Image: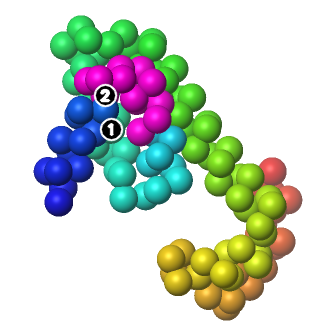
Amino acid sequence: MFSGLADWVTDVVDSLGYIGVALLVALENVFPPIPSELVLPLAGFEVGRGNLNLWGALAASTAGSVIGASVLYVFARRGGRPLVLRMRRFLRVDEEDLDKAERRFRRHSAWMV
């Protein structure tokens, strides 16, 4: 399975270039089975081969990360706790885990910020 995923990631970066890097990094943020350990070294390899520019690859991966994080933020902001509880089977989080996280956040949020 991993080699099939690696081939797909390679094909996306080869065919789409910077947009492919941004897309894959954004997907990696939202959909964890796509590992950044596969995407980012491939982008670095393409920079080394001269197929991508270092600054372009850096900008594309940063943009993809911001886009992916923004998507997750929107889901969390709009759906909140009820959405997490509805998706608990996929997220592997139960109500006790959420309570514990919220208590820790309240206790440590002032010094975190």
Segment colored magenta: 13-24
Q: Which mark is residue 39?
A: 1
Q: CA distance from mark 2 to mark 1?
A: 9 Å
Q: Check residue 70 for magenta coloring.
A: no
Q: Check residue 16 for magenta coloring.
A: yes
Residue 76 locus on image (x, y percent): 73, 61
Query: How many numbered dots are placed on residues in this image?
Result: 2
Q: Nearer the viewer, residue 82 or 69?
A: 82
Instruction: Determine which residue is flagged by label 2.
Output: 13
Q: Residues within 10 Å of mark 2 (few under 14, many from 20)?
A: many
Give the quadrant of residue 8: top left
Residue type at numbered disc 1: Val
Does residue 106 appear anywhere in the picture?
yes
SS state under label 1: helix
Q: Residues within 10 Å of mark 1 (few under 14, many from 20)?
A: many
Residue 52 locus on image (x, y percent): 32, 13
Is 96 situated above or below 67?
below
Residue type at numbered disc 2: Val
Name, please, the residue furthest toward the bottom.
96
